[in-house]
Structure formats: structure tokens, C-alpha cells
């Protein structure tokens, strides 16, 4: 039996998965198979060659995928986001860490069986950082990858550790064995800012206030923002996020000097987001209702990140700054989404 070379996306039904499936389907280079705990929405399902409904914790399901497909690239997107993870930290650890370990081991076995490295794309997050207080956050400005790696959340700790796990598979896996076994998993990771999609709303994250504000306004619903107006963290328009993963996947390995890269696009305050939303939807009803605990999480994230390495090594260059993200992507697309 001949197994087919494919791309595997886990967590494919999530926000990034939506954009990525469309992007890969358009590029049309390689068939896509997906794994998600929920069935894909049928429009997305039609764009993929095979849809597995199940958990990344299910090793026998991963064995089945291995037996049927030659996976050459993995986009491992499945995760529990930061707010949800604080309510169920043990489950978060299981899904975010053990699940990632399962996918890394799956990729190692795939590479051993088809004889080529598996490119493994992993979205980490600004949650991997932990700034101790607002004064330090203001002073820190654009944070570099290796500074402030002291996350304040289960999710952030999970992401930071999985970055290290991926690096271990890529560079040191079974380093004492007679035959070298590292490098079969070609691990590549980006630390995403908060992502804003016009097509989907996030669930269970803490950067959710920005996309929630925009989507509520587009639907004509009131929104009470759970962070202070002066709250500032980096954000990015979803098409740039998807593009970044795709670009990093195709970059020649020899050009990569790191396994985890910061990405930046724009970093508005919550007040800036409100102002921009009101410009597009003058009737929007947006109020402030601070959730001190979630505020604490956002305050521990940097106000900006230094993405020099990504720009230099693999040509990262986001198309959307704050103004363009609203004018050319969010407002026109979101308008169509809710037009009935
Ligand atoms: N957007 C994510 C969250 O809020 C951070 O990566 O959890």
C-alpha cells in the first residue's frame, strides 16, 4: 500500500485553522488532512482530503493517521487558550503539553518511516512572557525572544515549555543513542500576538477583548470591555498570521537561526481599538467593565515585541498595520459576514 504525502493540521476547526485550510487549499500544493475534537464546518471539510474527528491525546488515532498517510508537514494548532486554561490547569497541561509531545513523537515516527524530516509548525504566544509589573512593562518596550521568559499563566508556561520540547526534538533527541536521531522533526515556532479574525471569534483567550469588541459592534450588540482603556499588547490580523506560518514552513532550514520567533504587526491600546471600531460603527455601544483578574494576565504580557529575527531570517513582513487591518480587512470582511 502506498501512503499519500500530506499536510496535517491539528485543531483545524479553530480560528487559525480556518484561515490556514483556505490558504493551503488555494495554494493547492499538497492535500490537507485534519484532526479536531469537533467535526469541521462542512464548507471547510470540503477543502480537505480527510477529516479525523478525535483528540490529540488519542495515540491509537495518531497511529492510524501514521499508517495511512505520509505526513510531511504538521501545523499543530490544537490548544486550550489562556483564560480557559486557568479554570482547568490540569486539562490544559494535558492538552497543551502532553498533546504536543504526542504530535512531536508522531512526527519523529513519520520522519523515520518516510525518511525525510517532518516540518513541524507550532504557534506559541506572547503569553510565553511574564512582565512582573506595569512599570517594567512600560520600560521593556519591544521585548526580545529570550527576555522575561517567566509566564504568569498555565497556558504561557505550557507554550514556553513546548517551544523547548520542539527544540529538543530538532537538536538533541536521544543524543546518547548509537545513531543520531535528532533533526527528523524540523521544529519551527512563532510567538503570535493576539490574533484578530474577521471570520471567527476566539474562545477562551485573554486577548479576546479586541476581536470581541469588533464583532459585537458589527452585530449591533453592546460590549463591555474587560480591560482598562490604556491596556496595550501586540495584535495581528489573521491573514498575516496564516501567511507567517506558511512562509516559515517554506523557509530553507539553513536560514533559520532560532526555533522560536517573535512576530509583531501593531500594538494599539484598548482605547485605540474602541476609537477605530466607533469610526466604522458609529452606533457601537462599548463600555468598560474591568475584570481585575483577566487584566492581571494581559498586564503580564509585553506591550510590544522585537521581531527582527523573523524579518531577517525568513522575510516576515506583515501586510496589515493597525489602520489597514481595519480599513482593508476587518471592516469590509466582517460587514459581509454579518450582512443578512
Ligand atoms: N490569544 C491568546 C490568548 O489570549 C494568547 O496567545 O490566550
Image (tube, rainbow, N blue to C red):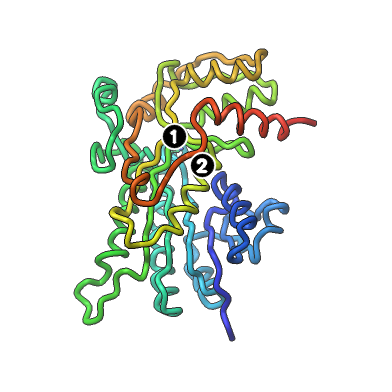
**Quick one: quadrant of the C terminus?**
top right
Whole-angstrom CA distance, mark 2 to mark 1, is 9 Å
Q: Is residue 224 above or below residue 90?
A: above
Give the quadrant of residue 307: top left
What secondary structure is marked by label 2?
helix
Up/down of 282 relative to 170, above or below: above
In the displayed structure image, the side of residue 199 where residue 188 appears, left or right: left
x 53%, y 25%: residue: 323
Ligand 1 within 8 Å of disc 1? The answer is no
The residue under the point 51% across, 14% down is: 288
**Residue found 35% across the figure and 42% down from its top:** 262
Q: Residue furthest right?
A: 340
Residue 172, image x, y percentages:
24, 66
Give the crowd class for mark 1: few <14, some 14-19, many >=20 residues within 10 Å. many
Residue 134, numbered circle = none
Is there a contact, CB below 8 Å, between mark 2 and mark 1?
yes
Q: Secondary structure at mark 1?
A: loop
Residue at the extreme bottom: 1
- Asked whether mark 2 lies closer than 8 Å to ligand 1, one says no
Query: Can you tell me which quadrant of the image ligand 1 is in?
Result: top left
The residue carrying mark 2 is: 240
Q: Quadrant of residue 140?
A: top left
In this rendering, position of residue 18 left or right of residue 208: right
Instruction: Identify the residue position indicated by label 1 in the image.
Output: 265
Q: Specify which label sits upstream in the sequence, 2 or 1.
A: 2
Residue 271 pos. (x, y %)? 48, 16
181 relative position to 252: left or right: left
The answer to which of 93 and 195 lies nearer the viewer is 195
Image position, residue 129 (x, y; %):
31, 37
In the image, 242 versus 159, the foreground residue is 242
Judging depth in this view, the residue of 252 and 280 nearest the camera is 252
Amino acid at each position: 500500500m502506498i501512503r499519500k504525502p500530506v499536510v496535517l493540521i491539528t485543531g483545524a476547526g479553530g480560528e487559525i485553522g480556518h484561515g490556514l485550510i483556505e490558504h493551503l487549499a488555494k495554494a493547492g500544493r499538497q492535500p490537507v488532512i485534519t484532526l479536531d475534537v469537533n467535526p469541521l464546518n462542512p464548507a471547510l471539510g470540503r477543502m480537505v482530503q480527510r477529516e479525523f474527528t478525535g483528540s490529540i491525546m488519542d495515540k491509537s488515532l495518531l497511529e492510524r493517521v501514521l499508517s495511512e498517510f505520509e505526513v510531511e508537514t504538521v501545523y499543530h494548532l490544537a490548544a486550550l487558550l489562556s483564560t480557559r486554561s486557568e479554570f482547568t490547569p490540569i486539562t490544559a497541561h494535558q492538552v497543551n503539553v502532553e498533546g504536543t509531545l504526542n504530535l512531536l513523537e508522531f512526527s519523529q515516527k513519520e520522519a523515520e518511516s518516510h525518511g525525510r524530516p517532518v516540518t513541524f509548525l507550532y504557534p506559541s504566544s506572547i503569553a510565553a512572557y511574564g512582565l512582573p509589573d506595569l512599570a517594567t512593562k512600560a520600560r521593556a518596550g519591544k521585548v526580545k525572544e529570550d527576555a522575561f521568559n517567566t509566564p504568569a499563566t498555565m497556558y504561557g508556561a505550557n507554550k514556553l515549555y513546548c517551544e523547548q520540547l520542539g527544540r529538543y526534538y530538532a537538536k538533541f533527541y536521544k543524543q546518547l543513542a548509537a545513531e543520531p536521531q535528532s533533526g527528523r522533526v524540523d521544529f519551527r515556532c512563532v510567538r503570535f500576538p493576539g490574533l484578530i479574525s474577521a471570520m471567527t471569534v476566539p474562545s477562551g483567550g485573554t486577548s479576546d477583548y479586541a476581536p470581541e469588541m469588533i464583532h459585537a459592534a458589527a452585530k449591533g450588540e453592546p460590549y463591555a470591555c474587560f480591560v482598562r482603556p490604556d491596556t496595550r499588547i501586540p495584535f495581528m490580523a489573521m491573514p498575516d498570521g496564516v501567511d507567517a506560518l506558511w512562509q516559515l514552513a517554506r523557509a530553507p532550514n539553513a536560514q533559520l537561526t532560532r526555533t522560536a520567533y517573535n512576530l509583531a504587526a501593531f500594538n494599539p491600546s484598548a482605547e485605540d481599538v474602541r476609537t477605530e471600531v466607533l469610526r466604522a460603527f458609529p452606533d457601537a455601544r462599548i463600555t468598560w467593565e474591568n475584570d481585575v483578574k483577566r487584566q492581571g494576565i494581559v498586564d503580564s504580557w509585553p506591550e510590544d515585541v522585537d521581531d527582527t529575527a523573523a524579518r531577517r531570517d525568513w522575510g516576515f513582513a506583515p501586510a496589515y498595520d493597525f489602520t489597514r487591518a481595519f480599513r482593508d480587512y476587518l471592516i469590509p470582511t466582517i460587514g459581509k459576514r454579518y450582512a443578512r
